[in-house]
Image (tube, grey):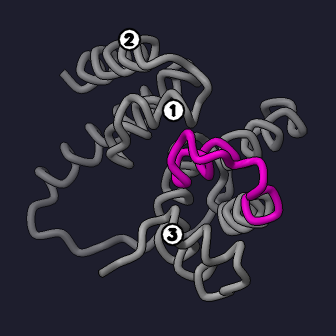
Amino acid sequence: MTPTDEELVASYRAGVEAAADELVRRHATSLGRFLYGSGAPAAELDDLVQEAFFRAFRGLDGWRGEASFRSWLYRIGTNLNRDRFRRQKGRQMVPIEDQEIPDHADPEGEAGANEMETRLLDELERLPRLQREVFLLRAQQGLEYDQICATLGTTPGAARVHYHHAVKRLKEAVG
């Protein structure tokens, strides 16, 4: 039987280091995806994810179990990303890199898909911060509204409204 996050936290508190390894294995990738979708630069993702886990493990006494470990970890990551954004005063560095040009069997279809993806990503960036974060937590990470509100410090009703508005705007952008 696979231990729950709560059981792993209890094991870690009891001195079982492997429990921390399992928590990192379970949540690092999804936390990184969420932070990237929330505007964190790809070059800083590893550092942000690592710092989120450091803070989570150092602050386990502050986790009361009211929210899931995952929601709590996402909240830590969200706060770190906001702090990073404030330090940069909203400036975002966009690296210029050589990109591989893949061989496509259907260049016309691929171009249409790429254009739609670009429009969707552009509109996602233009969403207000809370709408974007709620949308990513719900659509990308599969969190329920109670987990989202615990992660972002809002109410389930507000999370639903933010999600609804985000979906509406994104549909309009690709429609």
Residue 92 quadrant: top right
- Mark 3 and mark 1: span between their CA atoms? 28 Å
- Of the residues shown, which amino acid type is indicated by label 2? Val
Q: Where is residue 25 drawn, in percent x and y?
A: 51, 77
Residue 131 in the figure: left or right of residue 87: left
Circles 2, 3 touching at the beta carbon (< 8 Å): no
- Write the residue at 61% across / 88% down: 18
Q: Secondary structure at mark 1?
A: helix
Is residue 146 rendered magenta in the image? no
Q: Where is residue 40 drawn, in percent x and y?
A: 65, 48
Q: Where is residue 154 drawn, in percent x and y?
A: 56, 20
Instruction: Write the start and end of the magenta stretch as one range.
Output: 56-76
Q: Which residue was labeled with disc 1? A: 133
**Image: 171 above or below 85:** above
Q: Secondary structure at mark 3?
A: helix
Q: Nearer the viewer, residue 115 or 28?
A: 28
Mark linked to residue 7: 3
Q: Secondary structure at mark 2?
A: helix
Query: Reading the chain from its start, which is encountered first: label 3 or label 1?
Result: 3
Mark linked to residue 161: 2
- Write the residue at 68% across / 57% down: 95
- Of the residues shown, which amino acid type is indicated by label 3? Glu
In the picture, the quarter occupied by the C terminus is: top left
Mark 2 or mark 3, which is nearer to you? 3
**Image: 59 above or below 67:** below
**Image: 14 above or below 51:** below
Mark 3 or mark 1, which is nearer to you? 3
- Of the residues shown, which amino acid type is indicated by label 1? Glu
